[in-house]
Image: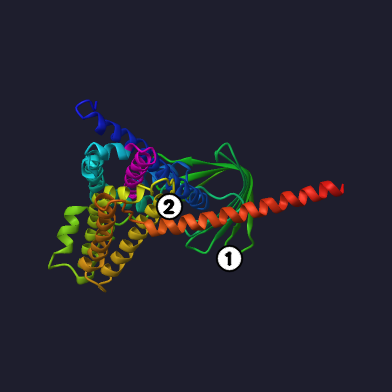
Amino acid sequence: MLNFLPAIDRYIFRLVIVPMLGVFALAASLLTLDKMLRLLDFVAVEGGPIGVVFKMLATLVPEYASLAIPLGLLLGILLAFRKLATTSELDVFRAVGLSYGRLLRVPYIITMVFMAINVALVFFVQPVSRFTYERLEYELRSGALGASIKVGEFTTLADRMALRIEESEDDGRRLIGIFARVANDKGQVLSISAREGSFLATTDDPDTIILRLTEGTIVQDTGNQTPRVLTFTRHDLPIDLPAIEEFRARGEDEREYILPELLRVGWADNQTETKRDASQASFNFRLVEVVMMALMPLLAVALGIPPKRSTSALGVFLSIIMVVAYHKINQYGEDVAALGLADPILALWGPFVIFAALILWMYWRVAFVPGGQAIGALENWFAKISKKIGKLFKRKRRHHVLADDDLAAEG
């Protein structure tokens, strides 16, 4: 498939793509699993069907993918150049006249592809999926997804009926130990207890279900007469389902706007200043996050090449810290700009210019300064700290060995 590329480019492509996809899958999986545990608890509390958990997780995939793609791209390229450096292959490439710019040809092709994917995610897919998630959460809270009656607890239905069930069998098809208290507009109250029961759907009215009770007692309290007590073998109790308000339209939150809507609202004269500020902040936040991906290959090279005769992995950890910290700074800038406290250009593109200047300087040090290291001082400090920690553990180990020898001699 890649035979049209030179052998060197195919080799670099394999070095980049494998760790990149691995990091992407790992990051997305960790984010998804963490959210899945919270959703399982939420759905269990609301009494909704378990299938809605996976629907809600599916709507979160675009958001998690937009976070995992830049991180996977950075670490994929970084680990590829780290391997080239630690195996001295990078020295061979440089010796035959291949510059860093030439070696970054394939990584930049990969970067452009994933930038296009991320543009589609953050400007079109993610807003719609975010709205879908909010709608599913609303429907779950309101009971539109078929929330179940909790066993052992009183459940209020239609504001006039309280229902309690002792046990539930056959996935809710058989209810045991039922107590219901029903009131009407005339002040009459029915207290119903039954040994068993089940819910039945009605064909003529979808807003009403039938609770079929077997072997029970009805106590009718009219308020001014002696309560009447009736026993029954089977009794059908109609239950009016509560009306569920239709969920709001998409666009209440500026994060739910797709690109054309952001541009239309953010620069429209007929919109409020608050709405314009929030839309412009969201647009600039999404755009700056995508543009920053173009600098990821340069940052990967600057941090992925350790000093000579060193296998330090400090650059790997530092790259993750830098990317996450920059993302948090952008989120803060978006919040400040959305409140109208700062111009979106200054709040979001200001940190980008500073971060980009730092990356370009780090890349220049590695690529054009003989023996240059972007984080040479940090590498030396990290090496010294590692040696001191290693000596400390060796001293403790030697102390334990001597102590064991003394105990053995005394024994």
Q: What residue is shown at x 21% (from left), y 39% (from top)?
A: 97
**The residue under label 2 is which amino acid type?**
Leu
Q: Which mark is residue 223?
A: 1
Q: Give the camera-side residue of 266 and 234.
A: 266
- Give the crowd class for mark 1: few <14, some 14-19, many >=20 residues within 10 Å: few
Residue 142 visible, this orientation:
yes
The residue at the far left in this view is 269
Q: What residue is shown at x 52% (from left), y 53% (from top)?
A: 45
| Residue 195 occupies quadrant | top right
Q: Which mark is residue 189?
A: none
Magenta highlight range: 63-89
How many numbered circles are shown? 2
- In the image, residue 20 lies at what x, y percent? 35, 40
**The residue under label 1 is which amino acid type?**
Gly
Would residue 87 be counted in the magenta stretch? yes
Residue 206 visible, this orientation:
no
